[in-house]
Image (spheres, grey):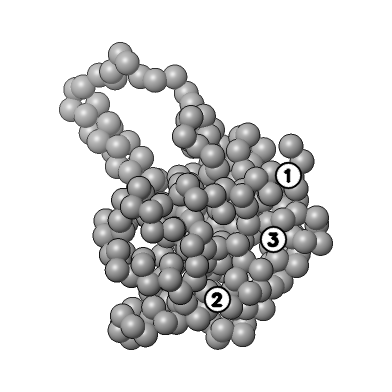
Amino acid sequence: MTIAETAEALRRLHADPELLQVVNVWDVATGRAVAALPGTRAIATASHSIAAAFGYPDGEQIPVELMLDMAGRIARAVDVPVSADLEAGYGDAGETVRRAVGEGIVGANLEDQLKPLAESVAAVEAAVAAAEAEGVPFALNARTDAFVHGRDRGRDVWIADAIERGRAYLDAGATTVFVPGNFGEDVVVELVAGLGEQRVSLIGLPDIPAPARLQELGVARLSYGPYPQRVVLAELQDLASYLYDGGTLPRDIRPRG
């Protein structure tokens, strides 16, 4: 498929009534391992995890060149659409998306960091316009940090803010609205009612309903952020401790993905 066809396929996956689950990866090895699974229809990178792999803290501390290079390597190594976590756009959302498209990326997260709404909308518009200029129907997952940075304002206030911001991002051309946070079904219902079915994107955390229920509620997408990397690193530490204690490698190690 061409990059435009791949991008269109990713947008259809967001519009499909079946919940799109994307397991976040951080290098070519993890990308290939996840892409090889029968249930994988698309994958997403995790900015926190890629930054950590290079020794940088999260929060746009990694040079954008490194982030885009790794995302591109992943995209070229797999046969499914790849959405990249581009944080807040690294100072220029339009240019960063343009460069991401050049790396074969067909979708992205773009966070607002609770900046003034007009500024955040302008960033979404710039990202969408940049992809359109490249002829790619980009799947922009516009993230609002209304819960992450604003939950101390009270439940009703942050939900109203998330819906207001989300609607503005959808009007500006975003495909979906990503509202990360650990909250229950009642909040999910309000977000879907305010933003529309197949428009809400969430992160899988303990209080978030199970995938089957999210699909029933009309959620479009579920991702997992840095948590897959944390699970893998914990398993690595457990293995190393076991080996240090005199254990041996198991005989049933699976081949590389």
Per the rendering, the mark at residue 97 is 3
Coordinates of residue 62 in the picture (x, y in percent): 56, 59
Residue neighbourhood size for the residue with mark 1, other residues' Cα within 10 Å, grouped as few (<14), some (14–19), many (≥20): some
Name above or below for residue 45 compared with residue 238: below
User: In the picture, residue 97 is in which quadrant?
Assistant: bottom right
Q: Between disc 3 and disc 1, whose residue precedes? A: 1
Front residue of 62 and 31: 31
Confirm whether residue 65 shows in the render.
no
Q: Between disc 2 and disc 3, whose residue precedes? A: 3
Residue neighbourhood size for the residue with mark 3, other residues' Cα within 10 Å, grouped as few (<14), some (14–19), many (≥20): many
Instruction: Verify CB contact (< 8 Å) between mark 2 and mark 1.
Output: no
- Where does label 1 land, which residue? 5
Name above or below for residue 19 compared with residue 38: below
Callout 1: helix, strand or loop?
A: helix
Q: Is residue 250 left or right of residue 22?
A: left
Residue in the image at 29% along x and 42% along y: 234
Residue in the image at 69% along x and 44% along y: 6
Q: Between disc 2 and disc 1, whose residue precedes? A: 1
Coordinates of residue 194 in the picture (x, y in percent): 46, 74
Amino acid at dot 1 = Glu
Residue in the image at 48% along x and 26% along y: 257
Name the residue at the top extreme. 251
Callout 3: helix, strand or loop?
A: helix
Amino acid at dot 2 = Arg
- Where does label 2 land, which residue? 167
